[in-house]
Amino acid sequence: MAVRLLDGAKMPAFTGAFMILLASLLTVPAEAQERFENPPDDVSTILDARRPPSVSFSPDNTWLVERERPSLPPLAELAEPSLKLAGVKLNPATRGPAREYAYTALTLRKTTARKGRTLEVGEGARIRNFDWDTSSRRFSYTMTRPNGIELWVVDVEDPTPRRLLGPVLNAAYGAPCDWLPGDEGLICKVVPDDQGPAPLPPTVAGGPRVEENLGGKRPARTYQNLLTDAHDEAAFAYYFTSKLVHVALDGTTRTVLEPAIVDEATPSPDGKWLLVDVMHPPWSRSVPASRFPRTIAVHELTTGQRVEVADLPLADDIPTAFGSTRTGRRGIYWRGDEPATLYWAEALDGGDGSVEAEERDQIYQWPAPFAADPAPLWTTALRFSRIMWGDDQLALGVEYWRATRQLRVWQLDPSNPDTKPILHWDRSSQDRYSDPGTPVYETGPYGWGVMRITEDRQLWLSGRGYSPKGVFPFLDRYDVAGQTTERLWQSRDPYYERVVDVMPDGERFITSRQSAKSPPNLFLRRLGRSRAQPLTRFADWAAAFSKVEKKLVKYQREDGVELTATLYLPPGYRRRDGPLPTVFWAYPFEFKRKSDAGQVSSTTNWFTRPGGSSVLFFLLHGYAVVDDPSMPIVGEGEELPNDTFREQLVAGAEAAVQTFVDMGVTDPDRTVIGGHSYGAFMVANLLAHSDLFRAGIARSGAYNRSLTPFGFQGEDRTFWEARDTYMEMSPFTHANAIDEPLLLLHGADDSNSGTYPVQSERLYEAIKGNGGVVRWVVLPHEDHGYRARESVGHALWEMFRWADTYARDADQGQP
């Protein structure tokens, strides 16, 4: 862990003893400080507490499996060998993803039973790729060993795990296996038998690195971990090459496709065809694997017949404007309601979101045996998003346009494409209050999920239930013909309860229910009845937070935009105790309408417990926390949000601080602003352009927008099209104005687009060079978010120390 600390001219009035201690720290070489620190014991206890397991239901909801994993993995797991190739991090020893977050235990039981059976998976198990078969009679998972990845299967009636394949699976890119229907087994990607040793990097460079562009625009957003040289290309081909095999339930295998660089291999719903996506050269050093050239074909599993569906070139010329996409057939997949019918989209506007066009995409479908020409199904005016399949007479197509946030849902007739689509919903995707919900799915005739359609042609819709009064999830019945809705059930105070699934009988449904005092648990409900049967009984793992006071606060920005924030008060706090040091933790969002920006999206009915490096841990140490205070950046009509980013950001922060000062909760002289990623970008901007906060905490941010010249976050103009906006928004440009202490944390292996670790390093150097107070901490092996126990503990230690020193105790002579 690398640490750099510089204290400049703006120093709080500390005691002489503390100044001596601080001076001694400043003279210690950085290497001597490079050790992991632990947060206080009360925080460490919660970090190490056992969390409730995740739950997976069988497709027919008869069975469930509780899957346990440690709350935080050890740093040693993150430090395992990794290769960074074409935007992917993989473990070369296992052919799986680097830094996998695996399950360690599985418990199987009937959904309505009180007790289950803990499966014998072995000490130190690392379980991933959990997947039910379509019949609900068995499930599979992978087991990571030091030398590779194995395939295991469990029959629910005789739940003794059986190993079907040894450590030969290739999970470097996506899930390695897919179930076939019935008792036919699985299709898996495996490492070729005779592949030989991996290519070794050259000890001496064979020549210079050369890249060129002989005309033609090829803009690209800032991707990381790309191929860089000939050795990377050879390693990519080596580690991503798989042989496709059919694995029977007795463990015998049959080769389906000889070695190739397989992206995905998906059986058709009837199990007779295999859709195979194979990447091929030329490789690119400017875009990730998802944009590499590829050939997509279907293979008949019995005869081996092959039909090519698409041969797509390298997609390194996709415009950066929002709404842009690659040309040619894209999003090729199976219809879930048909035995073997493909569908896909093709851009009609050249894939360029910046051009005016009345028609954006054409959707096609193509049934087996793929002898006739593909048939048009639907032409979209906006960019195609997805299709929700029901049956041969009803599907719902979704189109969306990013620039305006317009989202439309159309009724389609798959059996008669000449039928004019019927518009059901046309709204802003950011208008939460108008969200009608999402169709409830059920297991279709071929084992895939399809929309639940009643005999009288009605759909069931499940939604979050946003409203000015809070968030109350619901279950509706929707009449497709009349476009009318009947409310079947809705969550009520003091609970936040959402629908998880509907049972096959259509009368019972499973919910996940929580409240401010009770953790999320699963319940079985029956329509028309108020009582619910508990299915799980997970306990509170952080009881110290049961006495935290939480409330949703509404307030206004100076320009009239409605804002909200969640206020947390520490256990035992009383109003007569006076104002508190307060941490504001926020993240800015762009909106096209002021009315959408002000909508309520939170509720006090959530069971809130901190995890990872959560800001809520400050509550245990006497701070108030203002979580997610609205920071909307609004650009209505032709206005672009980022052209007034700074002004709106400061106005939002001013409104938040003033609101909680006026409530008597916040001491205005002891405030800290914090954020992660784009929130960190926000922090640095607020310190540069306001004097609202005594200190800042910025984690994994980007601070120099000239390093992301082809767009970032909600900005799709390039640097050369909006030079002033890029420069004015960049806190790096204003580093000399950052005159409050700033803590910078960053993962050493941050792979998030745009947030290179060098972003924090350069801002640190800029603030240091201008005499500011700044500390820069690099967490080894960590990505954009922090996962290892050691890293999380140290990040919290840094955050507490910084806030205590420069905000809570700054005027009291105590460090």
Image (cartoon, rainbow, N blue to C red):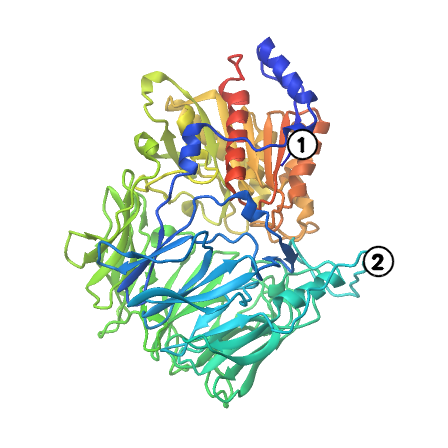
Residue appearing at x 41%, y 76% in the figure: 250
* Left or right: where 313 falls relative to 340: right
* Left or right: where 316 falls relative to 212: left
Whether 131 is drawn above or below 492: the answer is below
Q: Which mark is residue 412?
A: none
- Residue 811 location in percent, x, y? 52, 14
- Residue 707 location in percent, x, y? 69, 46
Whether residue 138 can be seen here: yes
Q: Nearer the viewer, residue 314 or 69?
A: 69
What quarter of the picture does the C terminus occupy? top right
Task: Find numbered disc 1 in the image and state the secondary structure of the residue it sits on.
Answer: helix
Whether residue 557 can be seen here: no
Q: Nearer the viewer, residue 325 or 119?
A: 119
- Residue 715 location in percent, x, y? 59, 50
Kindly identify which residue carries mark 1. Answer: 735
Residue appearing at x 66%, y 18% in the figure: 24
Q: Nearer the viewer, residue 1 or 483?
A: 1
* Left or right: where 538 falls relative to 800: left
